[in-house]
Image (spheres, rainbow, N blue to C red):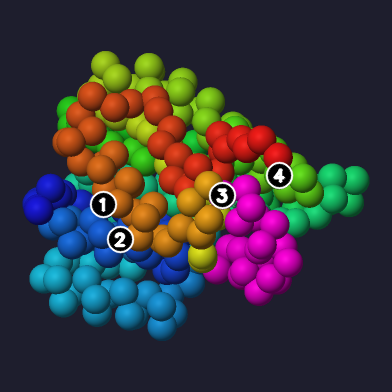
Amino acid sequence: MNRFENKIALITGSSQGIGAACALRLASEGADIILNGRTFDERGEKLIKQINDMSRRVTFLAADVSTSANVVKLVNDAIQVYGTLDILVNNAGVEKNHSFWDVTEEEYDFVMDTNLKGVFFGIQAFVKFCMAQKRSGVVVNMSSVHEEIIFPHFAAYCASKGGLKMLTRNLATELAPLNIRINNVAPGAISTPINQKLLQNPEQLNNLLKNIPLKKLGKPEDVAAVVSFLASDDAAYVTGSTYFVDGGLTYHYEEQ
Ligand code: BGC
């Protein structure tokens, strides 16, 4: 199914994990892809090859999206590459496991600047382009189940994802007259590099699995499938929502 024929998509943080799966999925459905990561390395090289093999155009733009200057430049550079931009997937995200009382300003800024500030100003740059060109657009933000549920020792992460939830709710209304849709995807426990420590700790992993009705971790591809739906015209009437991809984690309840 070529839902993205003649569409250009920028996916931030797409060297690995969920971002890479999103890039491959959108390309498999016809999109040309702008990849992004802090640095270009063999992971980017491999993805470029995979996307070229699908006969899609692909470019890697290195940028750290944690400052407004960087993310605005990234979006504007992405627009220059193939002359336009249709889909912005704000996937780049970071987390720090630290008890609240030990969190430093530097750690707080690292998490909030990447997960929330960069997204805010990235969307702003995309919206300005859409307005100037009188074009519609689609934004999909990678949120987390932790836009809704607590995550002890990850207070800044939760604050960033809670902020992302309200940003999306707010912008859905503000951007609807411009024909720009915006939604969040909220992954639960997905096997990706962000939670390698957890995946290598059998006791912690088993405790987590007890809270997941489907009793398994998700795959990056499970998340990419929902991103692709939201980015497509199949979701033409969907804006301001969060789609949970969590095996039931968020709203699980069992009688003991
Ligand atoms: C976090 C993971 C965590 C998962 C479930 C995600 O947002 O990035 O580290 O395992 O939520 O708690």
Question: Dot 2 corresponds to which residue?
Answer: 23
213 in magenta = no
Which residue type does callout 2 highlight? Answer: Ala
The secondary element bearing badge 3 is classed as: loop
Residue 7, position in %: x, y? Answer: 15, 49
> Quadrant location of residue 135?
top left
Question: Dot 1 corresponds to which residue?
Answer: 9
Question: Dot 3 corresponds to which residue?
Answer: 212
- Look at 29% across and 20% down and name the residue there: 176
Which one is earlier in the sequence, the residue at label 4 or at label 2?
2
Distance of mark 1 from mark 3, alpha carbons? 32 Å
Between tags 4 and 3, which lies in front? Answer: 3
Distance of mark 2 from mark 3, alpha carbons? 27 Å
- Look at 70% across and 57% down and name the residue there: 207
Task: Assess whether mark 3 and mark 4 are in contact (beta carbons under 8 angstroms).
Answer: no
Which one is earlier in the sequence, the residue at label 1 or at label 4?
1
Which one is earlier in the sequence, the residue at label 4 or at label 3?
4
